[in-house]
Image (cartoon, rainbow, N blue to C red):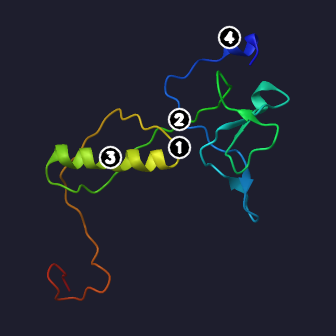
Amino acid sequence: MNEIVDDKLCTFAIRPTLRCFERVGTDQPSPCGQPAAWHRPGRLWFESGFYCAEHRQPDDVPAAGLLPVRRVHVTLDVYLAATSCQAPQAQAEAVARLEAAVKAVGGCLEVSRVISTFGKYQAQPAPGARPGDVGIVE
């Protein structure tokens, strides 16, 4: 990376796993997304790509040192039904599940706030349930 670019880009403290840029599939190709350890420098610094071992080219170089990377930050609210009536246990389990899911796609989860509330929930009958079963109203 040249000095001009180095001066203009921030250095990330939160660094999710680099993911493979290779487009896979035939009908609607989408990025491979597997962890990437190889760097394919572009003609310009912002055209660089990263690739997994399966999709690397012979002239790709190891992804090491300061590299220009676009990081995506998504802000959202996620609602999960609790697995405990106790707030600390319910919230800890929900965060653990989300961390695992985000890690599985190469991301880092930064939890800003966790809350839980009690409320009424209109549950749907289980598949195969019949009127007259416990809890099922005709």
Which quadrant holds the N terminus?
A: top right
Q: CA distance from mark 2 to mark 4?
A: 22 Å
Q: Amino acid at mark 2?
A: Pro
Q: Is residue 86 left or right of residue 63?
A: left
Q: Which residue is mark 4?
A: 7
Q: Amino acid at mark 1?
A: Gly
Q: Earlier along the polypeptide chain: callout 4 or callout 1?
A: 4
> Tag 2, which secondary structure?
loop
Q: Amino acid at mark 4?
A: Asp
Q: Quadrant of residue 50?
A: top right
Of labels 2 and 4, the one closer to you: 2
At 26% from the left and 69% from the top, the residue drawn is: 123
Q: Which residue is mark 3?
A: 96
Of labels 4 and 1, the one closer to you: 1
Q: Earlier along the polypeptide chain: callout 1 or callout 3?
A: 3
Q: Is residue 62 above or below residue 76?
A: above
Q: Amino acid at mark 3?
A: Ala
Which quadrant holds the C terminus?
A: bottom left
Q: Is residue 106 left or right of residue 48?
A: left
Q: Residue furthest right?
A: 43
